Amino acid sequence: MAFCSVLGLVTDLPLGVSRANAQMPLVESSGSPDFNLYESDGLIVSDPYSPVLTPLAMEVPVERFRRSFYQGSEISGGHVQGLGDRAGGLNQTYLEARVAVGVPLGSLENILAVSPFFRTDLLDGPTAIDVPETLYSTGVTLLQRKQWTEKLSTMVLLTPAVRSDFTTSENAFRLFGLGVVNWQVSTDWNVSLGAVYFDRSDLSVLPVIGATWTPRPWCKLDLTMPRPRLSYRTWKQGALAEAWAYVGGQLGGNTWAVSRDDGSHDELTLGELRLLFGYEVIQQGNRGLQIEGGYAFNRSIEYEHQDIEIDLDDAIFLQAGWKF
């Protein structure tokens, strides 16, 4: 697969699907359905529908959940390739697997999404300082979205996890958290306000603030920080599937508890900023494919206890995921 600018991307539409048919606003599953930095990508919506084939019904949203306890599985992986040898260079490869289930909290209108996961990061370098060859992350993501009124909704996400090299449990437990209030100002404007807790050694809390503008159902500008994004829908097949191309920014990195070569325990943090391009196919029932690539800069590696921070060269990255 090749990556290209969102503005220059040309994709064939499925038979009988035309952007001219798309005149009705999308029904958003959250104020920021592309907020996938937080693993919250529109997992639960509650609007039942009966698919029809008339042009006016082309804007029926693709149902992101399954009508069962089991909500699907996902595997993903990626690679970051350093562009230089500062501090000996650093390349990183990861693999991740997760399973999702939906737990009703009193009714089908109030669902708790539960998603246990396991991730492995393989490090190649740097040579200037000792780092583990393998890092692990395992835990569970808990997500709940509640629609309070026609215009006001909230989303809460918690991810308790163990992040370490599995040689020490000291400071290995980490809690990622996100809380957002969404206000649908009009049919094409949504405002979001909240906070995200990273529980990283170099980063604790950041505000989530911004707005999403959807002037047309196939074009969306998400100015929500810390992950802005411009998305363009390349095709839609009614309520069955749709595809989006996008460009945006992302805050990357994490903190792990590790053992040093001298036997001491420390906290290792990898940090970076990303400019990315992506393409996602969303299919009915929480299925689909996603591929992203781009440029990583402002990269660094840091040890907490010895107060060591080393700058790294920029990198390029490629990653992909499959929901089934």
Image (tube, grey):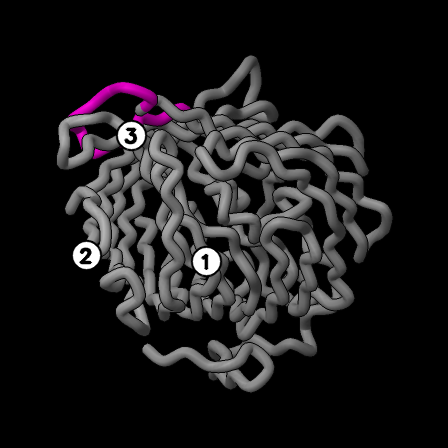
For badge 1, the amino acid type reads: Ile
Disc on res. 282: 1
Disc on res. 32: none
Which residue lies at the image location 59% right of the left edge and 39% below the top edge? 48
Q: Name the N-terminal-most of marks 2 and 3.
A: 2
Quote the CA–CA distance across marks 1 and 2. 41 Å
For badge 3, the amino acid type reads: Asp
Q: Nearer the viewer, mark 1 or mark 3?
A: 3
Query: Can residue 63 be seen here?
Result: no
Residue 67 place in picture, x, y as percent? 44, 34
Quarter of the image for residue 30 reads top right
Please state which of residues 165 and 125 is positioned toward the viewer in this rendering. 125
Please state which of residues 313 and 225 is positioned toward the viewer in this rendering. 313
The quadrant of the image that shows the N terminus is bottom left
Which residue lies at the image location 40% right of the left edge and 68% below the top edge? 314
Query: Can residue 211 be seen here?
Result: yes
Which residue lies at the image location 53% right of the left edge and 16% below the top edge? 105
Residue position marked by numbered label 3 in the rendering: 266
Instruction: Magenta stretch: give its range.
Output: 160-171
Q: Is residue 50 magenta?
A: no
- Indicate the secondary structure of the residue bearing disc 1: strand
Residue position marked by numbered label 2 in the rendering: 127
- For residue 226, side relative to residue 321 (left or right): right
Total label count?
3
Residue 171 place in picture, x, y as percent? 33, 22
Q: Name the N-terminal-most of marks 1 and 3.
A: 3
